[in-house]
């Protein structure tokens, strides 16, 4: 396995307020509406957080620690698959930066310290654009998009 | 931010090449991008400016370097707006055809 790291920067402009965007990331009842998951934590530096599928199984898909919390402008968390949670090298880092921009909010998601070519790096490249597009849609129109939608055929798993 | 800017930004081979280069290796400097593009640095800067205005490229300052990252979020929005509904329509056509052929 190579130790080469890779990073991604995603930016979206949302007609909303920084407080609403920050809440949408940290409040489970909002996150489940556009992400299909809840981010569960007390959001204190050093605390654990879990990315929990918002269905009956309540599968924990991502785990990590809260690194920095400055509502409503900045949140930094670490990020790993639960199956690799024991391996410190498997943790990547996600920074959410929320800044007012004209009458909008500029949300920047920086996902770095990812192992280049890893399954996680591939997964997040597919995931973030959909999640951020869905977040924008929810805050601007009141409706998220189906983040589990597949381009083809009827979706079986989109409970 | 708005779809017109996205489509305009995509309607040029140099700019789509810049996006391809960043897809292959994210977080490149202007100098790195210029190595693969046969044109003046100033022209590349202008093309990148159009990509930034469309929010297809975001930049991060790291020390003295400015790194360029591909930002596919606007493409996702274009997909939601312009592609997905046609896929749905096609699926429902197939569904109708299946019903027609199989009898319902």
Image: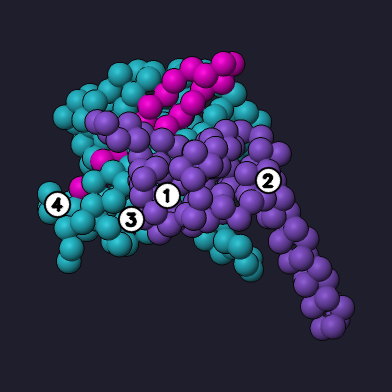
Chain colours: A cyan, B purple
From the viewer's perspective, is the residue at label 1 or at label 3 nearer?
A: 1
From the viewer's perspective, is the residue at label 1 or at label 2 nearer?
A: 1
Q: CA distance from mark 1 to mark 4?
A: 34 Å
- Chain to which mark 2 belongs: B
Which tag, 3 or 4, sits closer to the chain's start?
Answer: 4
- Chain to which mark 3 belongs: A
Range covered by the magenta-colored residues: A91-109
Observer-nearest residue: A155 or A84?
Answer: A84
- Residue at 47 percent across and 54 percent down: it is B37
Task: Determine the secondary structure under disc 2.
Answer: helix
Task: Determine the secondary structure under disc 3.
Answer: helix
Please tell me in which quadrant of the rendered image residue B31 appears. Answer: top left
Mark number displayed over residue A121 = 3
Q: CA distance from mark 2 to mark 4?
A: 40 Å
- Chain to which mark 4 belongs: A
Position of B27 relative to A99 (above/below)? below
- Residue at 23 percent across and 52 percent down: it is A5
Position of B51 relative to A21 (above/below)? below
Q: Position of residue A46 (x, y in %)?
A: 16, 29
Q: CA distance from mark 1 to mark 3?
A: 26 Å
Q: Which residue is mark 1?
A: B34
Judged left or right of residue A19, residue B75 is: right
- Is there any visible trace of residue B37 in the rendered image? yes
């Amino acid at each position: 396995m190579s130790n080469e790291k890779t990073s991604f920067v995603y930016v979206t402009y949302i007609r909303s307020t920084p407080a609403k965007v920050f809440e949408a990331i940290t409040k489970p009842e909002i996150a489940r509406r556009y992400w299909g998951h809840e981010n569960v934590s007390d959001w204190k530096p050093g605390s654990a957080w879990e990315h929990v599928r918002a269905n009956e199984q309540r599968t924990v898909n991502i785990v990590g620690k809260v690194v920095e919390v400055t509502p409503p402008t900045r949140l930094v968390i670490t990020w790993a698959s639960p199956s690799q949670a024991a391996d410190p090298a498997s943790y990547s880092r996600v920074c959410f930066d929320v800044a007012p921009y004209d009458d909008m909010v500029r949300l920047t998601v920086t996902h770095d310290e990812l192992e280049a070519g890893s399954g996680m790096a591939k997964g997040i490249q597919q995931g973030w654009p959909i999640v951020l597009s869905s977040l924008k849609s929810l805050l601007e129109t009141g409706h998220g998009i189906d983040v589990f939608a597949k381009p083809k055929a009827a979706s079986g798993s989109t409970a | 931010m708005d779809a017109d800017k996205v489509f305009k930004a995509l309607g040029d081979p140099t700019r789509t090449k810049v996006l391809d280069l960043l897809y292959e290796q994210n977080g490149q400097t202007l100098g790195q991008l210029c190595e693969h593009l046969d044109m003046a640095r100033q022209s590349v800067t202008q093309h990148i400016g159009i990509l930034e205005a469309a929010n297809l490229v975001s930049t991060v300052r790291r020390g003295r370097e400015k790194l360029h990252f591909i930002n596919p979020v606007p493409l996702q929005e274009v997909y939601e707006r312009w592609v997905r509904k046609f896929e749905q329509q096609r699926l429902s056509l197939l569904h109708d055809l299946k019903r027609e052929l199989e009898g319902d």
